[in-house]
Image: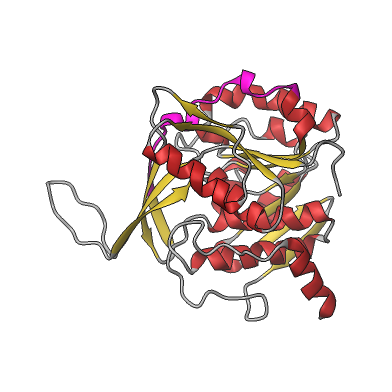
Amino acid sequence: MRATGGGYVVAVGDYCVDLILTGDVRPRFGQAEQILDDGSLEIGGSAGIFTSQMAKLGARVKALGVVGDDPFGKMVMDALSGSGVDVSLLKFHDTLKTGIGIALSEPDDRAILTYLGTIDAMRPDDLDETMLRLCRHFHLCSYYLLDAMRPSWREWLALCRDRGITTSFDTNWDPANQWTGVDELLINVDVFLPNDREALAISRQRNVDDAGEMLAQYGSLVVIKRGAEGASAFHRGKRWDIAPNAELGLPSRVVDTTGAGDNFDAGFLCGWLTGWDILSCMELGHRCAVGSLEQRGGVRGQRIERIAEFQLAEERL
């Protein structure tokens, strides 16, 4: 095991619901009515999807964030608890409503509208000494949506490192398209998990190779998710790549891309915290992402095999 703190993976971020709409249409104004193929309300947010998959893989995981005292907030609480996530650090807000993500999904892409609501309701005093005692690993999701917390992360991540708590970080998309503030955090982050578009935007590079090498200079293990091209990892001058194939697993069909990257994060980090080599961690991340692609939303297709079962299967090969 890689950390010396308490026994939990603590994940902070966007706990909300996702309204997933699918169809071969693009919205048009002028009161033009268009017909969709399907729609469903799902547990969402990068943090919600991540913690759910971590728990299903057998990790002890706590959700840290805020939801509204409303039906959507209770839906999030109940679903995460039912997946095995400890929700004792997930608070109800008296006045703000639970955040909502609206995703219009195509087979290989999606457009997202977000109502922040409680997503940005966390405050610096929600991070305290008790958290450090509970935590063996700290995962930060959706950095750019937690605007009020942004000035606090540098000191907090440094404190985690001082206490021997490992850390990971997935920015997700920046709605302001500024992509600032990440470099000063990476010096205290063990694993950085952007997708290819995010990595290019943050690094100001033109290709994934240069982006990975540049971001890895801060000391983090940088794992870039590349969609249908697989994933690439960079660390201390070394590089690892995986490409989707039948042996690793391919989706029987791509229903919805929502949450695939968050499920990859969960699989990768479960392997990494167990002490697996980097390539094996990437392969588990890929398997978790594939399951997500085959179902609508980010949690329906999640892997339910515990990490020990994957390890035993690998040893038998």
Q: Is residue 34 shown left or right of residue 146?
A: left
Q: Quadrant of the C terminus?
A: bottom right
Of 135 and 264, nearer the camera is 135
Q: Say if 188 sits above or below 27 in the image.
A: above
Q: Residue at x 72, y 29 (%)?
A: 131
Name the colour scheme: secondary structure
As drawn, the residue found furthest toward the left would be: 31
In the figure, residue 100 lies in which quadrant? top left
Magenta stretch, residue numbers: 112-129
Q: Position of residue 114 (x, y in %)?
A: 39, 40
Q: Position of residue 290 (x, y in %)?
A: 57, 68
Q: Is residue 3 shown left or right of residue 89?
A: right
Q: Say if 79 sits above or below 126 in the image.
A: below
Q: Residue at x 51, y 40 (%)?
A: 15
In the figure, residue 208 lies in which quadrant? bottom right
Q: Position of residue 139 (x, y in %)?
A: 67, 41
Q: Is residue 181 visible?
A: yes
As drawn, the residue found furthest toward the top would be: 125
Q: Is residue 115 shown left or right of residue 190?
A: left
Q: Position of residue 307 (x, y in %)?
A: 74, 62
Q: Residue at x 81, y 37 (%)?
A: 6
Q: Say if 47 sits above or below 182 in the image.
A: below
Q: Say if 8 sits above or below 207 in the image.
A: above
Q: Is residue 195 visible?
A: no
Count up the numbered dots: 0
Of 53 and 243, nearer the camera is 53
